[in-house]
Image (cartoon, rainbow, N blue to C red):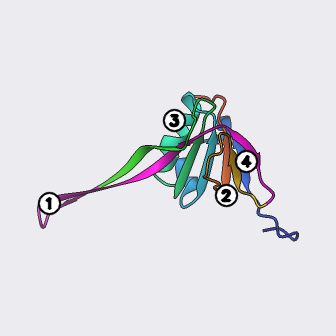
Amino acid sequence: NNSKGETKRRVLHSIAYDDPTEFTGQTVLCIGGRASGSDLAREISFHANEVYLSDTTCHEAVPVASRSTTDHSQATMTTTTTSTASVTWVPKTVAVRPDGSIQFDNDCPLHPTPDCIIFCSGYDY
């Protein structure tokens, strides 16, 4: 928070993206549902707490990917898999509200407050 009580938020373009671990524990909004947006959302989801992928072709919020953690225990010779929805596909981003939360199109009931917003309109390979 700054001196006015406003939350600081990181905003970047996908071309500046480099390392998904820098988003560990964060809530991230990727705006743009094509190659760069879907690739970044997937990669970041393994480290962030929540990832939202905003796409103009989406009409309602949908969990679209899951994070799987597999434990291969040598002592018990068992495998445990836990899956948690980690990327939520949401409609077009309409506004950042005064409280810092995001308003999506189509009366989407989700209003996350991301730590970082990434504009995904292309990136370097």
SS label for mark 3: helix
- Which of the two residues, 1 or 74, is positioned nearer the viewer here? 1
Amino acid type of disc 3? Asp
The residue type indicated by label 4 comes to Val
Residue at the (51%, 46%) spot, across then down: 88
Q: Position of residue 69 (x, y in %)?
A: 32, 55
Helix or strand or loop: what does disc 2 sit on? Answer: loop
Q: Disc 1 versus disc 2: distance between alpha carbons?
A: 39 Å
Q: Is residue 109 above or below residue 3?
A: above
Q: Amino acid at mark 2?
A: Thr
Q: Is residue 112 left or right of residue 25?
A: right
Counting the numbered discs, the total is 4
Q: CA distance from mark 3 to mark 4?
A: 18 Å
Circle 1: element type:
strand
**Image location (x, y in percent) of residue 85:** 43, 51
Contact flag, marks 4 and 2 (Cβ < 8 Å): no
Please give the residue where the numbered disc 1 appears in the rendered image.
78
Q: Which residue is mark 3?
A: 39
Name the residue at 55% across, 39% down.
Answer: 40
Mark 1 crowd level (few <14, some 14–19, many ≥20, 10 Å Cα): few
First in sequence, mark 4 or 1: give its number: 4
The tag earlier along the polypeptide, 3 or 1, is 3
User: Between residues 81 and 23, which one lies in front from this camera angle?
Assistant: 81
Decide: few, some or many residues near mark 3? Use Cα within 10 Å; few <14, some 14-19, many ≥20: few
User: Residue 11, which numbered label?
Assistant: 4
Quarter of image, res 111: bottom right
Residue matched to label 2: 113
Q: Which residues are magenta?
A: 70-98
